[in-house]
Image (spheres, rainbow, N blue to C red):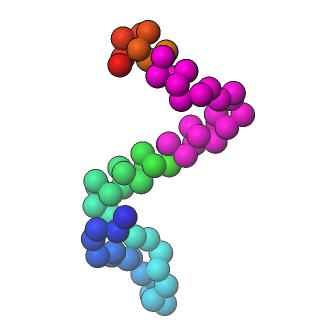
Amino acid sequence: MSRFQEQYIVDEKGQKTAVVLPIQEYEELLEDLHDLAVIAERRDEPTIAFEELKERLRKDGFL
């Protein structure tokens, strides 16, 4: 995932207190976090077979 050199902000003791990220990397991390939240919210929902999903998508004109 890391495509850049991390940059840190440190306090007077040299302890890392923050990290500087490129905007694109930050936005990708937010998107990943959102995806994980959606998965967690939906984990108890019933599942359907892949073939049934494909049939529904065909029926609705998405395939």
- From the image, give the main secondary structure of the stretch colored magenta: helix
How many numbered dots are placed on residues in this image? Answer: 0
Percent position of residue 31, x then y: 42, 45
| 37 versus 28 height, above or below | above
Q: Does 3 sit left or right of 48 as displayed?
A: left
Point out the residue furthest to the right here: 44
Is 17 one of the magenta-colored residues?
no
Image quadrant where residue 29 sits: bottom left
Q: Nearer the viewer, residue 15 or 43?
A: 43
Percent position of residue 10, x then y: 42, 81
The image quadrant where one finds the C terminus is top left
Identify the residue shown where x is 50% and y is 49%: 33
Percent position of residue 20, x then y: 34, 68
Q: Nearer the viewer, residue 29 or 55?
A: 55
Residue 20 visible in the snapshot: no
Q: Does 42 sit left or right of 58 as displayed?
A: right
| 33 versus 25 height, above or below | above
Percent position of residue 28, x then y: 36, 51
Stretch of the chain drawn in magenta: 35-55
Image quadrant where residue 41 sits: top right
Identify the residue shown where x is 33% and y is 75%: 7
